[in-house]
């Protein structure tokens, strides 16, 4: 069972009944920035340090309060898992206690990590007093989310990266497999992009990639997914779209790109074109790799037949 009462007393001298001799390690943890806690299993009382209370968003006047139910501050969806971790630790199944859960704080719930070990045992050798640390994981979670977003977004165009696009495609394929429906994929590749870069320079090439990205986004639905696979190659995922309709979408994209241009290094404008390959999920058993293969084959046909066109696989 989680502690029934939390003693919000920040004075280490008041903790000796729980965590004797608590002063030195308590002060060290405070200095390190982690919260400290001590829990008497017999009474169910838990004492927590000033850092713990500050991390939880308690106002100064709240620190002297008593009778705060710790269990009630755990997110309802996490309480059972926390109780199981504590029970396994107290039963001797684990040497240390470790639990990640959400705890109520000012402004809502925040992720926390609690770690602990036996500080004192009873005469029978059973855990009597536990003690450990409390770490607010909010900053780590924000950093993880930032890294995730950076890894999922192409830094030049802002579109999904190849990996993020393929993950989205696989998720959509699984949805179609469960519920049925159509799914189409479009591959687009800028025509002569390597020569374009050589002729006009990388800055103009980057401008062309960004222009194509904006053309794709402006033409597609919000439910569609678009990504940059690398170089001058882009991919579009069209949920609930049959092959014929996907071909019409690809033609609209091709026309939008062909009608656009980017500033050239000498002051004029440079036109760009792209070739397209379209494939539709032929059977629910098809995977994303097969869909990409058939769209890629159609794209090769478009290049071979003169570029700046749309091709679909032969039936």
Image (spheres, rainbow, N blue to C red):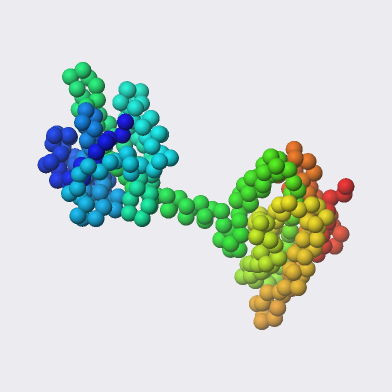
Q: Is residue 28 visible?
A: no
Which residue of the protein is positioned furthest toward the bottom in this rendering? 267
Look at the image and tell me in which quarter the N terminus lies: top left
State the count of labels: 0
| Residue located 36% across and 32% down the image | 83
| Residue located 40% across and 34% down the image | 80
Position of residue 136 measured from the top left corner of the image (x, y, whole percent): 33, 47
Above or below, comparing residue 210 to residue 176 in the picture: below
| Residue located 75% across and 64% down the image | 253
User: Foreground: 261 or 197?
Assistant: 261
Specify the quadrant of the image occupied by residue 79. top left
Whether residue 169 sits left or right of residue 68 in the image: it is right
Specify the quadrant of the image occupied by residue 178. top right
User: Foreground: 66 or 167?
Assistant: 66
Q: Is residue 64 visible?
A: yes
Which residue of the protein is positioned furthest toward the top in this rendering? 124
Position of residue 56 measured from the top left corner of the image (x, y, whole percent): 30, 50
| Residue located 32% across and 39% down the image | 71
Whether residue 191 sits left or right of residue 85 in the image: it is right
Position of residue 216 measured from the top left corner of the image (x, y, whole percent): 69, 64
Above or below, comparing residue 278 to residue 262 in the picture: above
Specify the quadrant of the image occupied by residue 112. top left
Above or below, comparing residue 152 to residue 26 in the picture: below
Which residue of the protein is positioned furthest toward the left in this rendering? 13
Position of residue 100 measured from the top left corner of the image (x, y, whole percent): 38, 40
């Amino acid at each position: 069972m989680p502690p029934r009462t939390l003693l919000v007393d920040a004075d280490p001298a008041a903790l000796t009944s729980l965590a004797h001799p608590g002063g030195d390690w308590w002060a060290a943890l405070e200095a390190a920035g982690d919260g400290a806690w001590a829990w008497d299993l017999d009474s169910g009382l838990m004492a927590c340090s000033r850092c713990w209370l500050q991390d939880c968003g308690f106002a100064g006047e709240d620190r002297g309060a008593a009778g705060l139910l710790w269990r009630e501050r755990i997110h309802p969806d996490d309480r059972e898992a926390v109780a199981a971790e504590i029970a396994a630790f107290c039963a001797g199944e684990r040497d240390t206690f470790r639990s990640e859960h959400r705890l109520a704080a000012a402004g809502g719930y925040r992720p926390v990590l609690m770690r602990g070990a036996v500080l004192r045992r009873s005469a029978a050798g059973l855990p009597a007093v536990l003690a450990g640390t409390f770490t607010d994981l909010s900053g780590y979670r924000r950093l993880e989310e930032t890294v995730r977003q950076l890894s999922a977004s192409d830094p030049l165009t802002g579109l999904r990266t190849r990996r993020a696009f393929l993950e989205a495609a696989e998720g959509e394929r699984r949805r179609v497999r469960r519920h049925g429906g159509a799914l189409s994929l479009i591959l687009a590749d800028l025509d002569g992009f390597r020569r374009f870069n050589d002729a006009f320079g990388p800055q103009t090439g980057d401008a062309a990639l960004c222009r194509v990205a904006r053309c794709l986004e402006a033409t597609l639905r919000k439910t569609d997914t678009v990504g940059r696979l690398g170089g001058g190659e882009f991919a579009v995922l069209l949920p609930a779209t049959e092959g014929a309709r996907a071909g019409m979408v690809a033609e609209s994209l091709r026309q939008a790109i062909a009608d656009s241009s980017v500033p050239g290094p000498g002051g004029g404008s440079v036109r760009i074109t792209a070739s397209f390959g379209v494939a539709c999920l032929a059977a629910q058993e098809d995977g994303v790799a097969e869909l990409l293969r058939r769209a890629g084959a159609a794209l090769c046909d478009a290049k071979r037949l003169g570029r700046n066109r749309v091709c679909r696989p032969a039936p």
